[in-house]
Structures are given as structure tokens and as C-alpha cells.
Image (cartoon, rainbow, N blue to C red):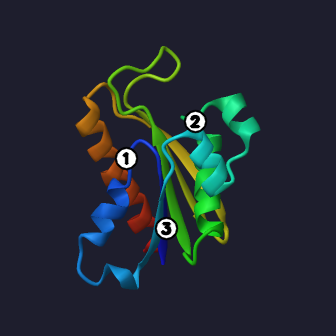
């Protein structure tokens, strides 16, 4: 079973998974946590982690994935937090997206720099990458 914790993709990963008939056999639930408050309230992301690293960071992605796994009946959870654009900053440019993958064995994270492709393209690249992470972890 899979759970998702999404910020910049706004539920698109859950949507991609559930587009397939019969997906209820593998998909438990999705958390769309766009604000910091939602990340804290729904997934248990520590306010101190958000303060120290910002929402777009691997530590936050790790806590999001961990929280989605703990708050669901899933065996694996993927999280996404990033800057889809437009805009960004010098330290967190448009196209930077952090991913987390949680299983009962632990959590892994990674950051990807998709670049300033535009909002829709960054979000689609993020969905594709999250799905690839899930497939890789399940095979």
C-alpha cells in the first residue's frame, strides 16, 4: 500500500496513481500539505525543522514521508516539497524539489534541480520522479 505527502504538486501524484482502475488495491491515502501549518498538523513535521531548514528541504521531506507512513495503513510513502515557480530565491531556486521515501526500514531523501521550466513542467517532472521512486522501491 502507498501513501503520498505532497506540497508543491498539490495531490498530482495521488491523482496519477488513482487514475488507474483498481488502484484501491495499492493506494491508501494522500496528504496535501501546502502550508507549513498543514505539514505540522497532518504529518507531524516539527516546527523546529521547518524553522531551521525551510519547507523546501530534505529534512522536511523526510519528516513528511515519515508522517504519511505513520498516519496511514501504507507500507511505503513518498513525499514532495519544492519550488514549482514562478520565482524562488538564491538559496531555493525555482525547480528545486525535495523528495522523501519512507518504509518500515527507514527514510531516504534526495533533492532534484529541475530548473526554471515553468510551474506546470516542474510539477509534472516532480510527479514523474516520485512515481519512479515508488516503482524503484517496490521492485
Q: CA distance from mark 1 to mark 3?
A: 14 Å
Q: Position of residue 49 (x, y in %)?
A: 71, 38
The one nearer the camera, 8 or 131, is 8
Upstream in sequence: badge 1 or badge 3: 3
Q: Nearer the viewer, residue 61 or 33?
A: 33
Image quarter of the C terminus: bottom left
Q: CA distance from mark 1 to mark 2?
A: 14 Å
Q: Secondary structure at mark 2?
A: loop
Q: Secondary structure at mark 1?
A: loop
| Residue 55: assigned label | 2
Number of other residues with Cα within 10 Å of mark 3, as a class: few under 14, some 14 to 19, many 20 or more: many
* Residue shown at 53% from the left, 64% from the top: 77
Q: Please give the name of the residue rendered at 59% of the width and 39% of the height, measured from the top-left corner.
A: 36
The residue singled out by tag 1 in the image is 9
Q: Return the disc, 1 or 2, that comes first in the chain's sequence.
A: 1
Residue 50 falls in image quadrant: top right
Residue occupied by mark 3: 3
Q: Is residue 86 above or below residue 121?
A: above
Amino acid at each position: 500500500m502507498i501513501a503520498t505527502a505532497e506540497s508543491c504538486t498539490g495531490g498530482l501524484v495521488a491523482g496519477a496513481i488513482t487514475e488507474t482502475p483498481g488502484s484501491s488495491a495499492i493506494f491508501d491515502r494522500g496528504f496535501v500539505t501546502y502550508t507549513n501549518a498543514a505539514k505540522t498538523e497532518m504529518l507531524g513535521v516539527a516546527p523546529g525543522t521547518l524553522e531551521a531548514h525551510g519547507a523546501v528541504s530534505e529534512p522536511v521531506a523526510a519528516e513528511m514521508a515519515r508522517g504519511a507512513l505513520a498516519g496511514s495503513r501504507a507500507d511505503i510513502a513518498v513525499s514532495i516539497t519544492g519550488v514549482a515557480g514562478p520565482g524562488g530565491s538564491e538559496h531555493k531556486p525555482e525547480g528545486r524539489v525535495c523528495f522523501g521515501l519512507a518504509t518500515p526500514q527507514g527514510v531516504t531523501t534526495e533533492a532534484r534541480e529541475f530548473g526554471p521550466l515553468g510551474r506546470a513542467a516542474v510539477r509534472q517532472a516532480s510527479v514523474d520522479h516520485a512515481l519512479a521512486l515508488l516503482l524503484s522501491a517496490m521492485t
